[in-house]
Amino acid sequence: MDAVSVDALLLLSFGGPEGEADVRPFLENVTRGRGVPPERLDEVAQHYLHFGGVSPINRLNRDLIEAIRAALAAAGVDLPVYFGNRNWHPMIEDTVGEMVADGVRRALVFPTSAYGGYSACRQYDEDILRARAAVADAPELVKLRQFFDHPGFVLPFADAVRDAAAGFDDYRLVFTAHSIPNSFDATAGPSELGGHLYSKQVAEAARLVASELGVTEYDVVWQSRSGPPQVPWLDPDIVDHIDALHAKGVANLVVCPVGFVSDHLEVVWDLDTEARERAESYGMGFARAATPGPDPRFAEMVVELVREHIDGVDQRKLSTLSTLGCTVNGDFCAVACCEPPARRPR
Ligand SMILES: CC1=C(CCC(=O)O)c2cc3nc(cc4[nH]c(cc5[nH]c(cc1n2)c(C)c5CCC(=O)O)c(CCC(=O)O)c4C)C(CCC(=O)O)=C3C
Ligand SMILES: [Fe+2]
């Protein structure tokens, strides 16, 4: 890649509430026009309220930004790092306004999601489009590529599984990622690749982690589905899968949340609380592998993705699956790439 000059890095994430009063307005922002039933919203609100209305995601992102700053400095790259979110403060529109005030003309954008698909990739392009439309003289915003098969993502997961499994003689390795509607998976990726980019990349990341560990038998399952029950989402669900593993006589379970960059609410609630309780109800051993976000190799990976642009360094990736996601000013990777198949009810 030819080197280009940039004057900032923007970490773009999902956002989460920081107190009880934020929970409802945050959930309204997330689900506006998305057809999530009110009962599901009440349930998710309870999960947040269980933690005092504070999502772990903002602190984790702030920690990650500090680690990225240190890794940039160690690599001799002088680049300010900004923080903006889709659904909660600091909102990306406000951050881009701040960048304009600081004189930023061209910035790279690191989205905190490793995968393709509507929710994991294209929606971040929509955030960039929205922010640029809202701010006069907005800088050029170049999104960094997907990193599901980068060693800085895969190797920390492999070490984390090893650590989590340390207490077990024998265990079943189960990978989990956020479920999405089947129809979203069917349209994930550019149409010439035949769809299912999200589930293919999740399967590939799982294969890479397992092969690093020398594990040949494992499962890939899904979690945190929402939406009305009549709409099919990727399955099986992790909790149902635990029932099935118990029926097969599995004694110990190591769960690797390969769909997630850090320990946000879906990890600490849906896995550490719900899945753990189900496993323990059967007397199964349960351990959850750490997410890669806090691992120094993850921040180093972000710097490497930046240097692919500013220094023209080669892409490191462990799979041959296509890597997309790198576009300018909120463009989509291809026409209709990762487009949700039907406009959801307003
Ligand atoms: C693929 C995927 C990722 C991974 C990629 C990425 O990381 O971006 C992800 C991440 C996250 N999802 C999050 C939170 C929520 N997601 C929801 C709803 C939904 N997620 C979906 C998919 C994904 N979501 C989908 C298809 C919906 C249905 C509505 C719609 O079509 O949009 C809802 C509404 C309530 C509910 O129904 O659960 C909430 C509150 C948080 C923050 C957690 C925290 O606070 O720590 C994070 C990082
Ligand atoms: Fe989500």
Image: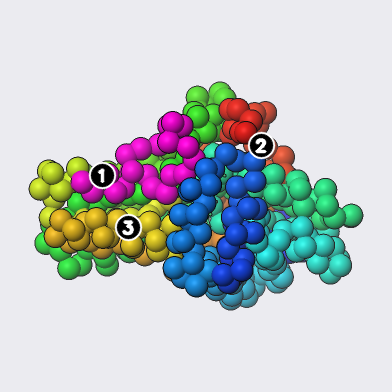
What is the magenta segment's predominant secondary structure? loop
Q: Which residue appears farthest toward the right when viewing the image?
A: 136
Q: Which residue is mark 3?
A: 274
Mark 3, Cα crowd under 10 Å, few <14 / some 14-19 / many 20+, is some
Q: Which residue is mark 1?
A: 241
Q: Which residue is at the front of the view, 29 or 180? A: 29
Secondary structure of the residue carrying tag 2 is loop
Q: Is residue 268 above or below residue 193?
A: below
Q: Amino acid at mark 2?
A: Arg
Q: Which residue is mark 2?
A: 346
Residue found at x 70% / y 56%: 108
Q: Which residues are magenta?
A: 221-243
Residue found at x 52% / y 51%: 41
Secondary structure of the residue carrying tag 3 is helix
Secondary structure of the residue carrying tag 1 is helix
Q: Amino acid at mark 3?
A: Glu
Splitting the image into 4 quarters, where does residue 117 fall?
A: top right
Residue found at x 24% / y 55%: 278
Splitting the image into 4 quarters, where does residue 159 fall?
A: bottom left
Q: CA distance from mark 3 to mark 2?
A: 31 Å
